[in-house]
């Protein structure tokens, strides 16, 4: 189930990184962050294991996994609208 960015904080961060850094750098960031979050979730002494934080980190891990599993990543909304405008200018 895919939710909008307002209910999925990681989606908003990913959109920002896509627009700023591109897909390759964003994918590297997601993979790196996912690895760090998983490591922390596995450490019983980490604050991430505490009740208020664990569900948030688990949710973020699921978001990252879903994003990576989708493979073909749509461009952020701003980039899509800019590309559409450029295409219409070229064709018009």
Image: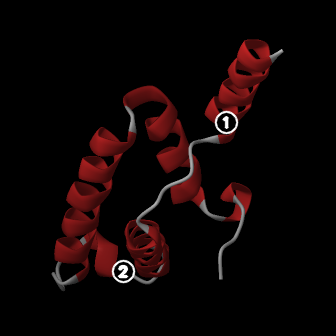
What is the quadrant of residue 92 in the picture?
A: top right
Residue at image x 20%, y 67%?
A: 35
Sequence-earlier tag: 2 or 1: 2
Q: Is residue 54 above or below residue 75?
A: below
Say what secondary structure mark 2 lies in: loop
Say what secondary structure mark 1 lies in: helix
Left or right of residue 52: residue 31: left
Badge 2 crowding class, 10 Å Cα cut-off, few under 14, some 14 to 19, many 20 or more, is: few
Rounded to the nearest angstrom, the CA distance separating label 2 from label 1 is 40 Å
What is the quadrant of residue 24 in the picture?
A: top left
Left or right of residue 83: residue 22: left
Nearer to us: label 2 or label 1: 1
- Residue nearest the observer in this picture, 4 or 7: 4
Quarter of the N terminus within the rendering = bottom right
- Residue nearest the observer in this picture, 44 or 62: 62
- Residue identified by numbered label 2: 50
Instruction: From the top left corner, tell me how far across and down residue 12 is, in percent.
Output: 58, 49
Badge 1 crowding class, 10 Å Cα cut-off, few under 14, some 14 to 19, many 20 or more, is: few
- Residue identified by numbered label 1: 80
| Residue 32 numbered tag | none
Q: Is residue 65 above or below residue 5?
A: below
């Amino acid at each position: 189930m895919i939710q909008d960015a307002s209910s999925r904080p990681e989606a908003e961060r990913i959109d920002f990184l896509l627009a700023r850094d591109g897909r390759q750098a964003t994918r590297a960031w997601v993979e790196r962050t996912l690895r760090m979050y998983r490591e922390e979730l596995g450490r019983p002494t980490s604050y991430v294991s505490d009740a208020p934080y664990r569900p948030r980190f688990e949710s973020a891990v699921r978001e990252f996994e879903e994003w990576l599993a989708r493979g073909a990543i749509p461009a952020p909304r701003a980039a899509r609208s800019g590309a559409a405008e450029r295409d219409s200018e070229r064709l018009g």
